[in-house]
Image (tube, helix red, strand yellow):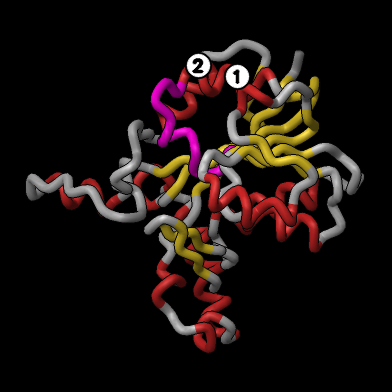
Amino acid sequence: MKECSIDNIKYDYKLFIGSSHTWALTQILNNFTNKNDSILDIGSSIGMMGNLLKNHGFSNLDAVEINENARNIASKYYNTMYDDLSKVNKKYDLLLLLDVLEHTVDHKEFFKEVISKLNKNGILLLSVPNIAHWYTRFSLLFGNFNYTEKGILDNTHLHFFTRKTIINFVNSFNGIKIESINASTSPIEMFISKKIRKSFLYKIFAIIKYKWVNLFPRILGYQHLLVIRKND
């Protein structure tokens, strides 16, 4: 697991069974066989997804990142780097919006602009944290709602979503539809040694954990993971 710190903000490669990065990569590899399809990574940070996609042969990659230091690091993975979504003047076959929406001031206007950058029949991969996760429910039971440096209660989050509210939010926009919704698992792998994570027994456990979480996504899901298609 790689980690990089920029301006006291840590960015992690979450490449394990049940993570949002693994889910996104799997969706892309399953749905985009043409490696020249156009992709825009919105909120790319240091380019984790760009690096993965480039290694899998995708070449038509652009990104949006407001943090200058992160943008400079990510630039080696993308053809064009934008510092603001409003400067993007073309449309794409695939948009990545992973752990970004909850940070925006006006999330409705921002999301409206996001889908305007999508080609007809294009796909948007969206992930947002689940405020109704069992941990936050348990904390609220004891009167606690404490912000943290990372995670569901990240101190830079401005909006919070349950499974129901993110579905209603997306469905409030015309011209798009949700094709599937999954849940990611809590990232306990961040605290487990690489040797353990690579073991056969742990992989079996991780698969069972992922399936269990998606049986009860409203309370066990760490993030909501949506595949959204533009149909007009």
Q: Residue at x 57, y 77 (%)?
A: 203
Please say if the residues under marks 2 and 1 sit with CB atoms less than 8 Å apart: yes
Which secondary structure lies at badge 1? helix
Q: Is there any visible trace of residue 192 in the rendered image?
A: yes
Q: Residue at x 35, y 55 (%)?
A: 150
Query: Residue 89 in magenta?
Result: no
Q: Residue at x 33, y 33 (%)?
A: 158
Q: Amino acid at mark 1?
A: Glu
Q: Residue at x 62, y 11 (%)?
A: 174
Q: Which residues are magenta?
A: 97-107
Q: Amino acid at mark 2?
A: Glu
How many marks can you see? 2
Q: Quadrant of the N terminus?
A: bottom right
Residue 162 location in percent, x, y?
37, 35
Which secondary structure lies at badge 2? helix
What residue would you read off at disc 2?
Answer: 109
Numbered badge on residue 34 = none
Residue 61 location in percent, x, y?
78, 44
Frontmost residue, 177 versus 95: 95
C-alpha span from label 2 to label 1 = 6 Å
Q: Quadrant of the C terminus?
A: top right
Numbered badge on residue 113 = 1
Residue 173 location in percent, x, y?
56, 14
Q: Is there any visible trace of residue 180 in the rendered image?
A: no
Residue 215 location in percent, x, y?
47, 50
- Judge left or right: residue 130 versus residue 36: left
User: Compared with residue 198, is residue 165 higher up or lower down, i.e. above or below?
Assistant: above
Q: Residues within 10 Å of mark 1 (few under 14, many from 20)?
A: few
- Judge left or right: residue 146 versus residue 45: left
